[in-house]
Image: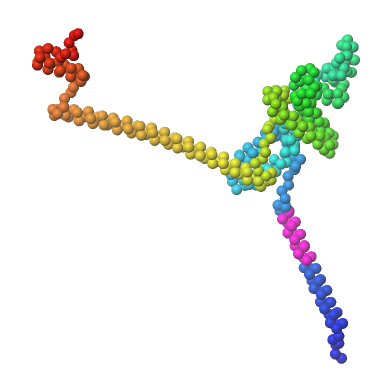
Amino acid sequence: MKKSSSPSGKFEALQLQSVNRQKSKTEKNKSMINLRRLVHTSSQLERGRTAFYNIHQKVTDPAKQDPDFFEKKARELPLDQNYIDALSKLYYEKIGSERDLGLKAADNLILEKTEFGLPRIEKSKIRAKYEDLDVLSSAPDSVKKIFSVEMATRKELSQEWKNSLINSVRQHSLDGNSLEMKIAWLTALIRHWSLLVNDIGQETRKKPTWLTHRIWLVINERRKSLRILRERNEKAFEKTIAALKISYHVPKQPAHVKTRKAWAEAQLKLRVENEKEKRLEQLHEEYDKQVEEHKRETQEKKRTLNNELNKLAEEMHRIDVIEGKSFKTAGRYEPSLISSLTESVIHSNLFYHPPPTMTEK
């Protein structure tokens, strides 16, 4: 019997072909995905898709407190085939250190683990809120110890630090609203909270972000007050930062976009300009040395030629004297005296008297 060629049979054959094609496409896609995964993981294991750097990097080098530390470091890198990679590494170190430096650099707190810039207060000193009590002046030592700084709470100790810093810059005893007093109060807050962050970090690994955020706010407020004080009274500004030991630097706007590529290009341009200036200075020094050497040699040759010329002139004159063509002059020739004597002799011969100009009046 012959196979039926009905439309329903043809439709089933076409449907079977489409299913087979879909399966083959699915298998190809799976193989491509597996290949891509293999390539992706191999490249990631070899180098990594993105460079990693720690944005919360701890700074342990006090030299990094200089705002131009990384730019100076970039100028000292050797100009070899690894220069760009070294610049990238330095940039990641710079970005990773910005947070810790922003919290500690202005108060010189890098590697500070004990006092954190806070003033030393005697433990036997009576606390501020009990200083005006006359009863304590005649009280025994055991009672005074109870009201001393040694037995103070953290809050009372913080108030003592604030009072000590404020008194170092206060304009007068009733000063409670000046910029100097405000800056001292903010400085005491920053350093006390930095000490508290360090104490919390020793007890737990969890970072107190609620406190570091407040430190950032207070640092920005103090920077604003310092800028206003510097604009109003520079002498008081210098006295304040010297008394509180604050490292103040005028913030400068970056001349390039804050990205790794732009920073590396900017540092490379500066390095090229510096190298060019150094090379020009070296060439200028070498040129000056060559000019001085040439002058010295020229003067020496000129002196030698003049000596030889004088010797030849003396030799020629001696030969002329021997041949009678010249003679040696004895004495000194005086043209005016000889001419006047000649005139007098001529007048005496002609008129038997001296010329009129020579007669006495």
Q: What predominant SS class does the magenta segment belong to?
A: helix
User: Along the horizontal axis of the image, is 178 left or right of 76?
Assistant: right
Quarter containing the N terminus: bottom right
x%, y% of residue 102? 74, 35
Choose between 98 and 322: the one closer to the eye. 98
Tell me the residue at 72%/32% (across/down): 105
Q: Is residue 190 above or below residue 329?
A: below
Q: Report which quarter residue 134 is drawn in.
A: top right
x%, y% of residue 198? 80, 32
Choose between 42 and 351: the one closer to the eye. 351
Tell me the residue at 75%/43% (across/down): 54
Choose between 357 and 329: the one closer to the eye. 357
Residue 36 falls within the magenta-colored stretch = yes
Residue 83 falls within the magenta-colored stretch = no
Report how many numbered discs are placed on residues in the image: 0
Q: Is residue 58 above or below residue 82?
A: above
The region drawn magenta spans: 29-45
Quarter containing the C terminus: top left
Specify whether residue 118 is in view. no
Q: Report which quarter residue 276 is drawn in.
A: top right
Specify whether residue 324 is in view. yes
Q: Is residue 256 above or below residue 322?
A: below
x%, y% of residue 300? 35, 32
Choose between 71 and 266: the one closer to the eye. 266
